[in-house]
Amino acid sequence: MPQQHLYRVSFVQQGKLYEIYAREVSHSAMMGFVEVGKLVFGEKTQVVIDPSEEKLQAEFEGVERFFVPVHQVVRIDQVQHRGKARISDAQGESGKVTTLPMFGPHGSGN
């Protein structure tokens, strides 16, 4: 049986930094998007339940795959073991995550 890869995907959405785990990550047929599929969450049989991971699991319930605009992706790592999926403030305490400026037809990116 071939080894299944596991990826940690970090992306920004509405001022929050999402960190999730998935088995499939690729460029999308839709230009400018990253496709994420086969999400991996903790076992529902665990005695200790993490509320932040439970919130993420509820948000993505029934989702087979989703698409993230490439400029919202902070990082994609191939990992050996699943960590804790979480949502945190994008600016956080350390301010390490900065979103790229948005350029559109009516703005200068400010």
Image: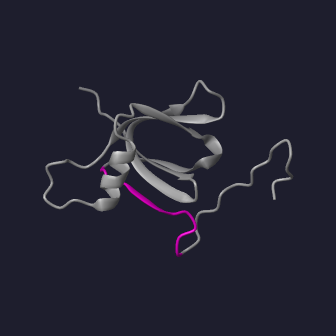
What's the residue at 65%, 46% (across, down)?
71
Residue 88 within the segment the image draws in magenta: yes
Residue 25 in percent (x, y) is at 46, 36
Horizontal side of 68 relative to 84 (left or right) equals right
Horizontal side of 46 relative to 68 (left or right) equals left
Residue 22 in percent (x, y) is at 38, 41
Residue 41 in percent (x, y) is at 29, 46
Residue 2 in percent (x, y) is at 28, 28
On-image quarter of the N terminus:
top left
On-image quarter of the C terminus:
bottom right
Up the image or down, 63 lies above or below 95; here it is: above
Q: Which of 14 and 95 is in front in this view?
A: 14
What's the residue at 55%, 74% (across, down)?
94
Q: Main secondary structure of the magenta part?
A: loop
What's the residue at 53%, 70% (across, down)?
92
Up the image or down, 89 lies above or below 59; here it is: below
Q: Residue furthest bottom?
A: 93
Horizontal side of 83 relative to 13 (left or right) equals left
Q: Quadrant of residue 109?
A: bottom right
Up the image or down, 48 lies above or below 73; here it is: below
Horizontal side of 50 relative to 31 (left or right) equals left
Q: Quadrant of residue 30?
A: top right
Query: What are the residue bounds of the magenta stretch?
Result: 81-93
